[in-house]
Image (cartoon, rainbow, N blue to C red):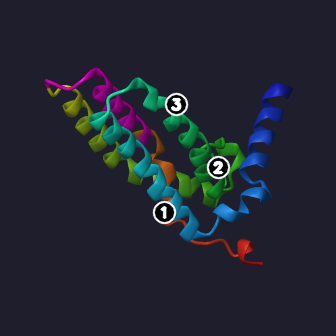
Amino acid sequence: MSTSKSKYESWLHRSMNDPALSWAHPQSVRRKLVIAMIALPLCFTAAMWFLPSIWWFAPLLVLFVPLMGSLNGSIRGLTELRQHQLDEREGRTRDAAFRKAFWPMIAIGVAGLFLLMKPGLSVELRAGIGFAAFILTMTMPTLILAWSLPDDVKDED
């Protein structure tokens, strides 16, 4: 293993477990973040429906990046860290989340494809549908973990 790779992985592990993200660890906060992450691409697609403009991508990305970072930090990077950086319980928890997310991810992807094939939609709306399906599909394991993980005892000190 090269030194730079191990430095990057340790940086990622440290940043995902940063105490500055302790505000996002309670389950009630994580659930609000999940709702916001689901609402963001749906609102983006609705905005494309009512006011088609490619400029909607800028505010979407400005909101998506910190929201996804907060979600990843709230679950301590379980879906982002490498297997060797997780203990056995964390690895099993992450694997279970990916198994739970499999069929919802397939359903969202298929629904997105069917909507994209619908005739008469503007290019902007197709982009919104495709991007919303992509975001929801790719974040599903993180959303499942953030919604379902119990509060840590360590955070209540």
Mark 3: which amino acid? Ala
Q: Position of residue 96 (x, y in %)?
A: 47, 55
Distance (Cα) linking label 1 and label 3: 27 Å
Give the residue displayed 51% in from the left and 50% down from the top. 142
Q: Secondary structure at mark 3?
A: helix
Q: Amino acid at mark 2?
A: Gly
Find the residue positioned furthest to the right: 3
- Looking at the rendered structure, the kind of residue marked 1 is Trp
Residue 76 falls left or right of residue 94: right
Query: For mark 2, does the 10 Å Cα neighbourhood hold few (<14), some (14 to 19), or many (20 or more) residues?
Result: many
Q: Which residue carries the number 1 mark?
A: 147
Earlier in the chain: of badge 3 and badge 2, it is: 3
Query: Could one spot residue 98 in this view of the protein?
Result: no
Query: Majority secondary structure of the magenta segment?
Result: helix
Residue stretch rendered in magenta on the structure: 119-136
**Picture quadrant where residue 25 is located:** bottom right
Residue that protrudes farthest toward the front in the picture: 51
Q: Secondary structure at mark 1?
A: helix
Question: Residue visible at 78% across and 28% down?
Answer: 5
Q: Which of 131 and 25 lies nearest the eye of the viewer?
A: 131
Mark 3 lies on residue: 58
Residue 155: x, y in percent?
72, 72
